[in-house]
Amino acid sequence: MDAEFGSFETEMNRGFLQVLALVVLDRKMYGYGMIKHFEAAGYTVEENTLYPLLRRLEKNGWIASEWDVSEGRPKKFYVITAAGRTVRAQGLKVWAEQGRTLRRLMEGDHDVREP
Amino acid sequence: MFENLETYLQEVNQYLAVKQGGDEILAEIRSHILEKADRESGAATEESVQRIIDSYGRPRDVAEKYIEGSEIITPVYRKHLFRYTWILFAFHAALTAVALGFHMSIIMFPFFFIPRMPVLAALVYLPMAWLADFGLVAFVLYIVTQRNRSLNLPWLRISRVLREARRPKAPRLAVFVTLLVILVVAVAAFLRYHTLFFYSVNLQAPEPLMNHAASIFLSLMVLAALLCQVIAYGVRFVVNSAWVTLIKNALILLILWAIWNSPIAVRFKEVPGVDLSYYGGVLVIILISATAVKFIKDLVLVIREMSHP
């Protein structure tokens, strides 16, 4: 049951994490910093999930990256692009609409017709 | 540099089938693990790095997350893979039959290389041919997936034909009686004239079409084929299965093969302007081809019967 829920949770988180990443990348951040930032907000994300996701977002042109080698250890920083902002706005709209739909259904405030 | 970290990254790289940016992915994982070890243990050591590696995940799982959605062959082509393989194999098997019949090699680069071989070797060759066909189709689908995975490949609609022809049609008594009469007449003719091949139709003194020995041999072969036909048709009144026609067509193929490889030299009656040996050869090739096609169709039906009894 736990394994089944784990898979279900992973599916749910997939889209949510994309929106989260686009939200926090309004300012330049690197992977480890993002994970800590999410944790401070009460959301845990596995590192081996975040990095592939960032790569996909970058491939889509929604975020851009650059390596910073000014400190001792090189770090890859990410920031949202203009295309990413558009997608983020649409994603937030979808997410809000889904939340409203879920609330309406759970509260029974909907028009159900028997087929 | 930590040896355990580099070993781990090498293992990730082993599974990391990405076209570009593989080194950058590894560099980012390296940077992350070292920073986390630094922050959580004060300074990165072999032990602290190993702890982070253990929690990061198995190399295979880590790599898998980067290549999600980039299948070798897109799953929607799975049925195409088998359908195309069987179609290609049908051609392959038919050409193998031709190669056996003509004692020759057939090369159609890069699709087929059928060496000259005896019948027993063909039994070993055909399963390997299926695997080669499977590999060829898989390779083509791999290319299609990598180049344009949204391409709509043609779906050859043989399934409907096969479904309708799944069980052979019910045998009819009139057809069976006709076949039986033909067999009886042929046997009677052979017993009386020692041949079934006539140049003239003068019943008092019919003129044979070929030399005596070849005439007897070929007539016996024709009678054997007719007998197979009659027995198979009769059996279908009891068991109307594709197995029956499969075995019948296999036997007829053997008979045709024996005719083609006749140990007795055939000398046709000389007819001005007509090369009878040429037309005889063409007729046998047509019969072999038609029977081979029926045999392959029966084979597919039998496989279908076995998988959906």
Image (tube, helix red, strand yellow):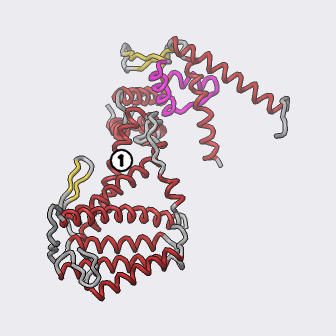
Q: Amino acid at mark 1?
A: Val
**Residue B154 lies in quadrant:** top left
In this picture, is B173 found above or below B112? below
Q: Residue at 39% of width from left, 55% of height from top?
A: B86
The residue at which mark 1 appears reads as B137
Is label 1 in a helix, a strand or a loop?
helix
Q: Does residue B219 belong to the magenta stretch?
A: no
Q: Hey, which quadrant is residue A88 in on the image?
A: top right
Residue at 56%, 19% in the rendered image: A22
Q: Nearer the viewer, residue B53 or B73?
A: B73
Asked whether B95 or B180 is in front, the reply is B180
Determine the image quadrant of residue A43: top right
In the image, residue B229 lies at what x, y percent? 41, 76
**Quadrant assignment for the N terminus of chain B:** top left
Q: Position of residue B109 (x, y in %)?
A: 22, 47
The span shown in magenta is: A33-61
Q: Residues within 10 Å of mark 1 (few under 14, many from 20)?
A: many
The x and y percentages for residue A49 are 51, 33
Does residue B51 show up? no
Q: Residue at point 71% right, 23% down?
A: A97
Image-based side of A1 in relation to B237, left or right? right
Which percent across, then down, holds residue B243? 45, 72
Q: Is residue B61 above or below residue B36?
A: below
